[in-house]
């Protein structure tokens, strides 16, 4: 589904190489996790894949179901089925959460040449999905993420994911700032979306999220590259021994 | 002190072009106002209070021409139940207006109210009070020469808002209207104003709120590109009274809106807000002066300006807290969203405080659309243009939220959305 080959990325404004040849394939129906120390390039990878400005791809490619992602605008990538759950969801005062969701759902449908969802159908769907994530009517009415707690923001990300039904979901440190209960709620939301046709890339510092969202494959990223790939046991190894052993001898 | 020669010449030229209405209860107020104008002189380019806005075309003896703009959309507020009063180029249009009858309200026209009138105690009085510490000669000029206006006395809460609709029909019209609004204790009223009024418009509204009275004022100035306007609101607030005014300005080559509020009774509340959408040859100036002269009053100033293609926004806002005005809660924010590098925002926030137990804050910012927010919306599938519009609406939201009636707020937002959509096409 998601195929990344030899991806090299530098910052647009300064001569700083961040990704130095990332190779990664996420198959439909699978959950891949990326772990790694601070500054290894994990978040950059998620931003570059979803189309944030400020980065320059100097080499390599990234495709989603064979389509060249790097050639598309951010909104085109979203319509093609890519979703990024942000580490720091942005607050947008003055724009109601519900309005935002409906605008997003219909913008994507329009881009795909599908009919827009009627208000009634939308309302029914959003209420059902919100209930599963324990998001109340008030949170739906309030401006996007304004005054939301850390946990509420992350649940709101998962609600957007549930409404947009992407093919490929990237979760960028979705566990940061969450207590155990909130993390469990978010993980349940993600697990409910696990599906044969959907791929996940879960970026995290800590193993604890992976107790709740069980990965099929775990990658360790350091210094702009994937340095090791293994099964779920790799995450446990990192949890126990840290990254030091793995990093030894890496340029 | 003698006026500088340039100012004297300009003032005399302007006064020569006008005729002082005489007779009736307003006669002495008009004569006094004229002498104030002669003493102060009309605003000139060297006046500190006009540092950011050129007054020449507002002062000139002859109003500059303004092409009449044919809007392709229905005027604001047209769909709501309201008492409609229409002025065309500053002239009352009886045919287009409803009967000036509304339960709980008496409405007279300045041009027709010849007998002794309740408005005598207010007309020119609040304007005069508002001349200190800063002179506002265009308001005095208006008191002297206003040809018409509405004298609105609210004794009990009416069932619907009063809507003053201004139309512009002649290319070189020069209108001067002066309204007086008096709201009695316990009464609450909404006054709506919109329309371009004239090629050049000088308007004064004096507002006198008794204890516990409430006035909601929502105004829209647009979409004529070439019109000019200088407006003043002078408001005096009694104990526990509430005054909320919001102005949306869309286009217009030159607009200066001054709001002067005096909180004279304890626990009074004044909210002054505005949003403006400026494109190209657009200059918009909000000048606000709020005086706290009583205990435990609250004032808010919230101004948001969206500027592009070389448009200019100005904000001069002052909070003056007098000695003894303890427990004052004053808030002031002025922000601009600059959609390109050619536009500019000039802000001069001021606080002057003589009481020791007050909370006053002010802030002013200028910036472009936030890239992180834009990316967030685009990552959810919103095309760039729609995402930018949404963030622009979000930017003015804090000002629009000052409109208490949500349906009015929605109408304002819909106008802004239409403005954005037109610019995107």
Image (cartoon, helix red, strand yellow):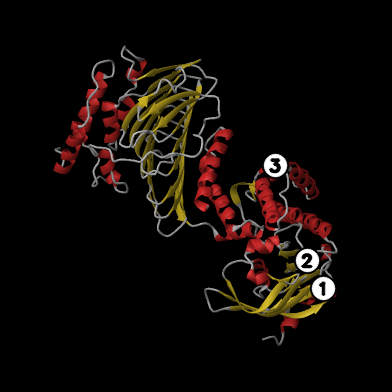
Distance, label 3 to label 1, CA atoms, is 38 Å
Distance, label 1 to label 2, CA atoms, is 10 Å
Q: Residue at x 58, y 35 (%)?
A: B406
Q: In the rendered image, which residue does mark 1 sit on? A: A217
Per the image, label 1 sits on a secondary structure element best described as strand
Question: Label for residue A138?
Answer: 3
Q: Residue at x 57, y 38 (%)?
A: B410
Q: Position of residue B6 (x, y in %)?
A: 16, 43
Per the image, label 3 sits on a secondary structure element best described as helix
Q: Is residue A45 left or right of residue B385?
A: right
* N-terminal label among 3 and 1: 3
The label nearer to you, 1 versus 2, is 2
Chain identifier of the residue bearing label 1 in the image: A
Per the image, label 2 sits on a secondary structure element best described as strand
Q: Position of residue B217 (x, y in %)?
A: 47, 31
* N-terminal label among 2 and 3: 3
Distance, label 2 to label 3, CA atoms, is 30 Å
Q: Residues within 10 Å of mark 3 (few under 14, many from 20)?
A: few
| Pointer 3 and pointer 1 on the same chain | yes
Q: Residues within 10 Å of mark 2 (few under 14, many from 20)?
A: many
Q: Position of residue B53 (x, y in %)?
A: 31, 46
Question: Label for residue A232?
Answer: none
Q: Residue furthest bottom?
A: A249
Q: In the rendered image, which residue does mark 2 sit on? A: A200
Foreground residue among B326 and B119: B119
| Pointer 1 and pointer 2 on the same chain | yes
Q: Residue furthest top?
A: B115
Q: Is residue B79 left or right of residue B249?
A: right
Q: Mark 1 and mark 3 in contact (Cβ < 8 Å)?
A: no
């Amino acid at each position: 589904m998601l195929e990344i080959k030899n991806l090299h990325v530098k910052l647009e404004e300064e001569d700083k190489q961040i990704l130095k040849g990332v190779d990664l394939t996420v198959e439909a129906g699978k959950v891949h996790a990326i772990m790694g120390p601070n500054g290894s390039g994990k978040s950059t990878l998620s931003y570059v894949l979803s189309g944030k400005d400020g980065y320059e791809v100097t080499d390599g490619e990234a495709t989603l179901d064979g389509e060249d992602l790097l050639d598309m605008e951010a909104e085109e990538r979203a319509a093609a089925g890519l979703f990024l759950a942000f580490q720091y969801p942005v607050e947008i005062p003055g724009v109601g959460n519900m309005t935002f969701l409906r605008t997003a759902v219909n913008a994507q449908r329009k881009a795909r040449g599908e009919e827009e969802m009627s208000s009634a159908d939308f309302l029914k769907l959003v209420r059902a999905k919100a209930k599963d994530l324990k998001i109340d009517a008030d949170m739906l009415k309030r401006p996007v993420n304004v005054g939301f707690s850390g946990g509420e923001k992350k649940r709101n990300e998962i609600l957007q994911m549930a409404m947009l039904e992407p093919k490929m979901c990237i979760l960028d440190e979705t566990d940061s700032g969450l207590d155990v209960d909130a993390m469990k709620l978010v993980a349940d939301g993600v697990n409910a979306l696990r599906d044969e046709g959907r791929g996940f890339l879960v970026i995290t510092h800590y193993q604890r999220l992976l107790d709740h969202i069980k990965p099929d494959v775990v990658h360790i990223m350091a210094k702009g590259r994937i340095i090791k790939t293994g099964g779920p046991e790799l995450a446990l190894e990192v949890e126990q021994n840290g990254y030091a052993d793995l990093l030894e001898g890496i340029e | 002190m003698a006026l500088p020669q340039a100012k004297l010449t300009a003032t005399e030229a302007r006064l020569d072009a006008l005729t002082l209405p005489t007779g009736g209860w307003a006669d002495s107020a008009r004569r006094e106002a004229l002498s104030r104008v002669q003493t102060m002189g009309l605003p000139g380019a060297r006046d500190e209070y006009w540092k950011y806005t050129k007054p020449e075309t507002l002062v000139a003896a002859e109003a500059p021409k303004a092409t009449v703009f044919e809007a392709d959309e229905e005027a604001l507020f047209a769909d709501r139940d309201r008492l409609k009063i229409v002025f065309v180029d500053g002239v009352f249009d009886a045919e287009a207006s409803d009967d000036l009858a509304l339960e709980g309200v008496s409405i007279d026209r300045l041009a027709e109210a010849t007998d002794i009138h309740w408005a005598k105690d207010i007309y020119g009085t609040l304007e005069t009070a508002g001349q200190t510490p800063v002179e506002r000669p265009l308001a005095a000029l208006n008191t002297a020469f206003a040809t018409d206006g509405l004298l609105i006395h609210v004794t009990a809460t009416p069932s619907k808002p009063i809507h003053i609709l201004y139309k512009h029909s002649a290319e070189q019209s020069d209108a001067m209207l002066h309204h007086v609004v008096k709201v009695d204790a316990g009464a609450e009223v909404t006054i709506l104003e919109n329309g371009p009024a004239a090629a050049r418009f000088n308007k004064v509204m004096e507002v006198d709120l008794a204890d516990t009275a409430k006035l909601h004022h929502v105004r829209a100035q647009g979409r004529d590109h070439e019109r000019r306007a200088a407006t003043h609101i002078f408001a005096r607030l009694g104990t526990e009274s509430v005054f909320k005014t919001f102005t949306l300005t869309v286009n217009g080559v030159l607009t200066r809106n001054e709001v002067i509020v005096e909180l004279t009774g304890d626990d009074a509340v004044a909210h002054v807000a505005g949003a403006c959408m400026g494109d190209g040859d657009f200059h918009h100036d909000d000048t606000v002066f709020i005086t706290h002269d009583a205990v435990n009053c609250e004032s808010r100033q919230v101004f948001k300006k969206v500027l592009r293609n070389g448009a200019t926004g100005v904000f001069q806002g002052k909070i003056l807290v007098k000695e003894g005005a303890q427990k004052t809660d004053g808030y002031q924010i002025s922000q601009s969203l600059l959609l390109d590098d050619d536009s500019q925002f000039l802000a001069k926030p001021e606080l002057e405080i003589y009481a020791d137990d007050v909370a006053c804050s002010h802030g002013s910012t200028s910036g472009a659309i936030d890239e992180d927010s834009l990316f967030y919306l685009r990552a959810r599938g919103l095309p760039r243009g729609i995402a930018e519009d949404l963030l622009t609406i979000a930017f003015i939201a804090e000002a629009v939220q000052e409109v208490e009636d949500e349906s009015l707020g929605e109408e304002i937002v819909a106008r802004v959305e239409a403005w954005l959509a037109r610019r995107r096409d």
